[in-house]
Amino acid sequence: MPLKTVSGRHADPRKGRGAGINPEGRFEKERRDAFDDGWNTPADEPRALKTAVTAERVASIIARNDSPDIPFTQSINPYQGCEHGCPYCYARPSHAYRSLSPGIDFETRLFAKVNAAEKLTEELAKPAYRPRVISLGANTDPYQPIEREWKVTRGLLQVLAECDHPVCIVTKNAMVERDLDLLAPMARKNLVRVFVSLNNLDHGLARRLEPRCSAPARRLLAMKRLSEAGVPVGVLVAPVIPFLTDDRIEAVLEAAWEHGARRAGYVVLRLPWEVKDIFREWLERHYPLKAKHVMSRVHEMRGGRDNDPDFGSRMRGSGELAKLVGERFRKACERLGFDSGRMHRVAELDATRFTPPSASGQRSLF
């Protein structure tokens, strides 16, 4: 279908979005393909993609895992889907469980867990609950743009702060600064760490790769403000993408150090399930001359495949190129002074202060 022409140029409805396709999820039995019927009527003209948010009440809120690749066992995702629109996002396939596409649907049809704080209070109040660090942002970003209106993340932080419960946050959005009134007091009790995800400093590349995230310079400023407020902050160089961001590792680490980050981690590009097709389409659209080279290097780090799901190698990759990336990261961290051990160092956060909600002044739910 031809795109609508404005002032001699095509108005692409995908502008400001990461995915350019909307493939069916892996559980769908039918497939839908767009085609040009030749009429080119106004109703057929592509429209700008708007974000739709559905309020959702969930039965539980804490997700648990025993993966050896990540340093936490508990996590909370305030939202399903993510408006940031990163085409490489490994969380995209989760939309298939809702019979929605991991493509455009994932970044335009979102779900806000509006009773998240209430459910968290219930779960923390259970006699059998034992406090362990909770990660916010393990799947979708807790500070994606819709958080401004819905404030689900802030509600969760208020509960955690009142209970003196340790938390680790990962985000690509400078909106995390909004909650410094909660984070700074928690930091003084050794209850919080914030990691800002940043894989390059090129605003042009970032605008295409992470269309609705904060700009790189703005993320660096957020690191600085968090650090100045006493909140321990780190940088997550992720994902490392061959021929696109792999040459920026040292520059990102240097800039992050200058802005107060003192911990660092990295992850090599992962392309599970439907993500590989979404990322390939993005590559062909934005970097057609590099696309084959990028995927060739991805295969080199993934044992000849688009993705390696195995524990121990899925985050870091394998082969000589992956080893080289790891060595560069390690040497840069050593030169600058970063703590690049276990990324979150969650064991260092204090879980001994925890006071269950029923004894911490919060109202009973019953």
Image (cartoon, grey):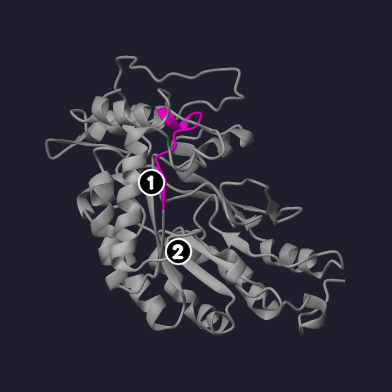
Numbered label tally: 2
The question of residue 126 being in magenta is answered with no
* Residue 271 figure quarter: top left
Mark 1 or mark 2: name the one nearer the start of the chain.
2
- In the picture, the disc for residue 141 is none
Q: Amino acid at mark 2?
A: Phe
Which stretch appears magenta? 266-276
Query: Is residue 306 toward the left or the right of residue 58 in the image?
Result: left
Residue 174 in view here: yes
Q: Residues within 10 Å of mark 2 (few under 14, many from 20)?
A: many
- Residue that label 1 marks: 239
Query: Is residue 72 toward the left or the right of residue 246 in the image?
Result: right
- Residue that label 2 marks: 195
Q: Return the x and y of residue 366 as percentages of the image width and height.
A: 87, 71
Residue toward you, 123 or 312: 312
Q: Amino acid at mark 1?
A: Pro
Residue located 48% across and 60% down the image: 170
Residue located 40% across and 58% down the image: 172
Q: Return the x and y of residue 137 as percentages of the image width and height.
A: 53, 57
The question of residue 275 being in magenta is answered with yes
Residue toward you, 171 or 144: 171
Residue toward you, 32 or 352: 352
Residue located 31% across and 25% down the image: 41
* Residue 132 figure quarter: bottom right
Residue located 77% across and 76% down the image: 357
Which quarter shows the N terminus? top left
